[in-house]
Amino acid sequence: MKNIHVLLIPYPAQGHVTSLMEAARCFTSNGLKVTFVNTEFTHKRVMSAWSETDGPSGLMQMVPISDGMEPCDDRNDLGKLTKTMFQLMPVKLEELINDIMGKG
């Protein structure tokens, strides 16, 4: 199983991020490599909430991707957030996957 690499991409809402983070920890505890993708906004919140002892393991890579919104935009506007994410994230995810696969 050492060649298995899991890409996890939660919708940027706390319940989604928290649940997938628990799954990611289960995967890494079983030796799987995980790339956990968050929007830049959520990534900053997750990273600031972690302490040194309960942060990501060596098998988990945390990667931020832009959600396409401006810093002053209201991320509680789920319609706008979803629209901008679907416009920008597919290209960014393809680039990330190519980098992971060594094609970038």
Image (tube, rainbow, N blue to C red):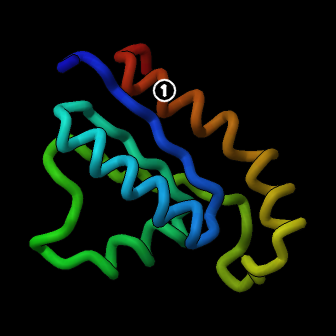
Mark 1 crowd level (few <14, some 14–19, many ≥20, 10 Å Cα)? some
**Rendering coords of residue 51 (x, y %):** 19, 78
Q: How many marks?
A: 1
Q: Is residue 102 left or right of residue 76?
A: left
Farthest-out residue, left? 53
Q: Quadrant of the C terminus?
A: top left
Q: Measured along the vertical axis of the image, is residue 7 above or below residue 12?
A: above
Q: Residue 75: name its quadrant.
A: bottom right
- In the rendered image, residue 6, in percent from the top left (x then y), is placed at 39, 31
Left or right relative to 28: residue 24: right
Residue 58: x, y in percent? 14, 46
Q: In terms of depth relative to the viewer, which is nearer, 49 or 68? A: 49
Amino acid bearing label 1: Ile
Give left or right: position of 54 versus 46. left
Depth check: 58 or 86 in front?
58
Residue 17 against residue 14 in the figure, above or below: above
The residue under the point 52% across, 70% down is 42
Q: Quadrant of the N terminus?
A: top left
In the rendered image, residue 71, in percent from the top left (x then y), is placed at 65, 79
Q: Tell me what residue is drawn at x 35 percent, y 52 percent.
A: 62
Give the labeled residue for mark 1. Answer: 97
Q: Residue 39 falls in which quadrant of the image?
A: bottom right
Dot 1 falls on a residue whose secondary structure is helix
Please tell me which residue is depicted at 47% across the width and 21% down the height of the picture. 98
